[in-house]
Amino acid sequence: VTAVSCPSNCNGNGVCVGGTCVCVTGYQGASCLDPVTSSSPSTDTADIATNCPNGCTGHGQCMPDDTCKCDAGFSGEDCSSPLPTAHHAHARHAAASSFLE
């Protein structure tokens, strides 16, 4: 397994999650290098993801109420649980059907 790195290791101002920097409060940008100022409010949801459980593990979006809205195919409080795909569900059903015959 090859580790996925982040730009400039997030410059010490964030955490690398799946190759994407999740910036701590006060920093923004792809590598968490840019300080947030009143004239440049952050519009990147990854910048506020540190308020959500595990930054939504790179598989979801941090919502204003500090909960994760998981990407398709993931679930759980921090979106870390992959959902079974339709292919896997069909395979389980087929296996169960053949067992019952």
Image (cartoon, grey):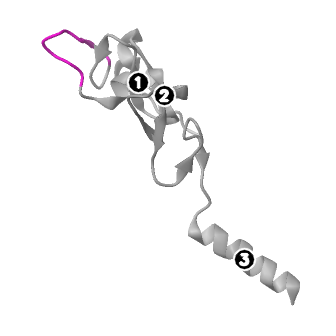
Is the Cβ of the residue at disc 2 closer than 8 Å to that at disc 3?
no
Per the model, the C-alpha gap separating discs 1 and 2 is 7 Å
> Measured from the top left, where is residue 36 in percent x and y?
24, 12
Which of disc 1 and disc 3 is earlier in sequence? 1
Q: Magenta stretch: give its range.
A: 32-42
Where does label 1 land, which residue?
Answer: 22
* The disc label shown at residue 66, or none: none
Please name the predominant secondary structure of the magenta segment in the image.
loop
**Residue located at (54% from left, 27% from top):** 54
Furthest-left residue in view? 39
Disc 1 marks which amino acid? Val
Would residue 50 be found to the left or right of residue 45 on screen? Answer: right
Graded by Cα atoms within 10 Å as few (under 14), some (14 to 19) or many (20 or more), the crowding at tag 3 reads few
Would residue 55 be found to the left or right of residue 8 on screen? Answer: right
**Residue located at (37% from left, 23% from top):** 48
Q: Is residue 92 above or below residue 28?
A: below
Between tags 1 and 2, which lies in front? 2
Query: Is 39 within the magenta?
Result: yes
Is the Cβ of the residue at disc 1 closer than 8 Å to that at disc 2?
yes
Where does label 3 land, which residue?
Answer: 93
Per the model, the C-alpha gap separating discs 3 and 1 is 39 Å
**Residue located at (57% from left, 69% from top):** 86
Which of disc 3 and disc 2 is earlier in sequence? 2
Q: Is residue 87 above or below residue 98?
A: above
Q: Secondary structure at mark 2?
A: helix
Furthest-bottom residue in view? 101
Which of disc 2 and disc 1 is earlier in sequence? 1
Query: Is 97 within the magenta?
Result: no
> Measured from the top left, where is residue 45 in percent x and y?
33, 30
Where does label 2 land, which residue?
Answer: 55
Q: Is residue 84 above or below residue 38?
A: below
Per the model, the C-alpha gap separating discs 2 and 3 is 34 Å
